[in-house]
Image (cartoon, rainbow, N blue to C red):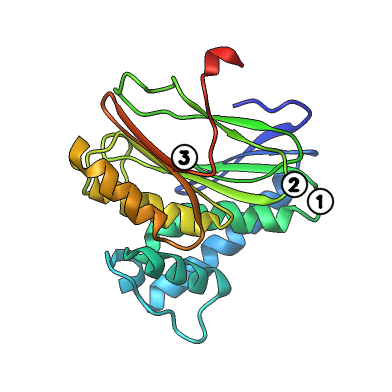
């Protein structure tokens, strides 16, 4: 976790643990935004508890906050429950709020990243006990546009997954869609034979720009992505 020319700081609020890089230390502003969006989601859950537990898409109520509606739309696009998009949602909405203070921002939240960068960045892929873990990096070009890079795993971490992939990484300009899609694709990968059809599913989702699947010593990838060897950096 390093980025030349940017200040690094951390903001934590209950389950949300944000590692943030920006032009300035915006810890107070980031904490304010994190509390705001967490509160909006929690208040919605208090009235609609199924939003927290559903494993299938839900329609948001008309009076739902924007972040909740966005989570529901992202989840619906790939057939998962709305909370599959929560980490990407927090990263993106906090990141967008902070963008008025800094023209470059990186927010990592439990393996889900929202980024707006002017210079090229490299994202190392951690894949648990896979021999490919930390051996592959994604090049994210400095195009000064928002991008979400989200990871789901059936073998690493505490998040619910029905798959066996060591890492599924999806890329989209919408971090919520990338987060939900990573979950959906990971759920499909139970053996190496599932990698191709899982990639085909990711290709079929409008807005998904790329996907990387790692299962033990097997790798599948598709899309507008560049894989590099970290040793060459």
Residue extending furthest toward the top: 231
Which comes before the other along the chain, label 1 or label 3?
1
Left or right: where 185 falls relative to 147: left
Instruction: Locate residue 26, reporting x and y percent.
Output: 75, 44
The circle drawn on residue 219 is none
Q: Nearer the viewer, mark 1 or mark 2?
A: 2
Query: Which structural element holds mark 2?
Result: loop
Q: Within 10 angstroms of label 3, few (less than 14), some, or many (20 or more) residues?
A: some
Q: Within 10 angstroms of label 2, few (less than 14), some, or many (20 or more) residues?
A: some
Task: Examine the rendering and report whether any part of residue 182 can be seen.
Answer: yes
The circle drawn on residue 101 is 1
Q: Nearer the viewer, residue 13 or 181?
A: 181
Vertical arrangement, residue 12 with respect to residue 7, above or below: below
Which comes before the other along the chain, label 2 or label 3?
3
Q: Distance of mark 1 from mark 3, alpha carbons?
A: 24 Å
Q: Nearer the viewer, mark 2 or mark 3?
A: 2
Q: Distance of mark 1 from mark 2, alpha carbons?
A: 15 Å
Q: Is the C-beta separation of discs 1 and 2 under 8 Å?
A: no
Instruction: Name the residue that disc number 3 marks.
Output: 111
Vertical arrangement, residue 108 with respect to residue 76, above or below: above
The circle drawn on residue 144 is 2
Instruction: Locate residue 171, reporting x and y percent.
Output: 51, 47
Q: Is the C-beta separation of discs 1 and 3 under 8 Å?
A: no
Instruction: Locate residue 87, reporting x and y percent.
Output: 47, 52
Q: Within 10 angstroms of label 1, few (less than 14), some, or many (20 or more) residues?
A: some
Instruction: Locate residue 206, reporting x and y percent.
Output: 47, 63
């Amino acid at each position: 976790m390093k980025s030349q020319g940017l200040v690094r700081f951390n903001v934590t609020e209950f389950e949300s643990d944000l590692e943030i890089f920006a032009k300035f230390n915006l810890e107070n502003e980031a904490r304010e935004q994190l509390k705001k969006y967490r509160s909006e989601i929690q208040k919605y859950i208090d009235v609609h508890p199924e939003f927290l537990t559903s494993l299938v898409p839900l329609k948001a109520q008309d009076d739902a906050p924007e972040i909740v509606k966005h989570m529901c739309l992202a989840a619906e696009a790939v057939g998962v429950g709305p909370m599959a998009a929560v980490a990407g949602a927090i990263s993106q909405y906090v990141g967008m709020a902070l963008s008025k203070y800094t023209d470059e921002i990186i927010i990592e939240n439990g393996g889900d990243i929202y980024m707006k960068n002017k210079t090229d960045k490299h994202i190392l892929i951690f894949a648990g006990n896979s021999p490919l873990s930390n051996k592959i990096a994604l090049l994210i070009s400095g195009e000064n546009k928002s991008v979400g890079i989200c990871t789901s795993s059936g073998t690493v971490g505490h998040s619910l997954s029905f798959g066996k992939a060591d890492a599924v990484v999806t890329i989209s300009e919408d971090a919520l869609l990338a987060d939900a899609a990573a979950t959906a694709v990971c759920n499909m990968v139970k053996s190496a034979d599932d990698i191709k059809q899982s990639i085909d599913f990711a290709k079929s989702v409008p807005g998904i720009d790329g996907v990387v699947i790692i299962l033990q010593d097997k790798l599948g990838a598709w899309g507008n992505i560049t894989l590099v060897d970290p040793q060459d950096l």
